[in-house]
Amino acid sequence: MRILVTGGAGYVGSHCVRDLCAAGHGVVVLDSLIKGHRAAVDSRAERVVGDVGDAAFLSDLLAARKFDGVMHFAALAEVGESVQSPLRYYRSNVSNSLSLLEAMRAHGVYRLVFSSSCAVYGVPPVVPITEDVPLAPISPYGRTKLIIEWAMADCCQAWGLGATSLRYFNAA
């Protein structure tokens, strides 16, 4: 498969890129390198420096290559910072992800793995947490992740997107 990995120069994204390359998939990494590290990207992957929020750039990238799917790791991910700068998180995590979904639909890419977060659970009523625990994020970061999970579910219903969310508790 040919996979676009957004945020593929970050911690979790770069590990997924390495595994995808090892499995023989064609991988294109899209990363702004604001938080990611060029050296973290597997040399077998194609590297593209750019912003997921740049709709024209993203459209050109998806038009130039035929992707079978996208793994979306590009996001801001610090809970405390999200409380201090909520609009920065909404712009990065929500607006940019919506741009990605729009571009995927426009270019016929219907598979998505989304890097969500355990922050969508907030303070869980039980531990261990199961997937049927109510979603009740308590930070802007957690809310931005849940908003995109909802948007993905709506896109699945509306235009046949096949999507799943990964909810990490400790990525390390």
Image (cartoon, rainbow, N blue to C red):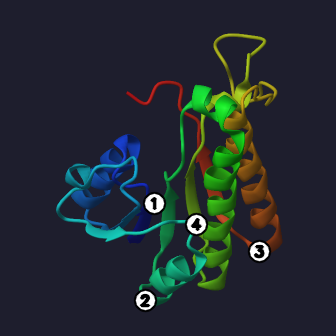
Kind of residue sitting beneath label 3: Trp
Marks 2 and 4, how far apart in space? 18 Å
Which mark is in front, 2 or 4?
4
Q: Which residue is mark 1?
A: 6
Query: Between disc 3 and disc 1, whose residue precedes?
Result: 1
Which mark is in front, 4 or 3?
4
Q: Which residue is more in the foreground, 29 or 96?
A: 96
For this orientation, the residue located farthest to the left is 43
Marks 4 and 3, how far apart in space? 22 Å
Q: Which residue is mark 4?
A: 53
Residue 121 at x, y percent in the picture: 72, 26
Q: Secondary structure at mark 1?
A: strand
Residue shown at the point (72%, 29%) measured from the top left:
139
Residue shown at the point (62%, 61%) measured from the top left:
96
Quarter of the picture containing the C terminus is top left
Marks 2 and 1, how far apart in space? 16 Å
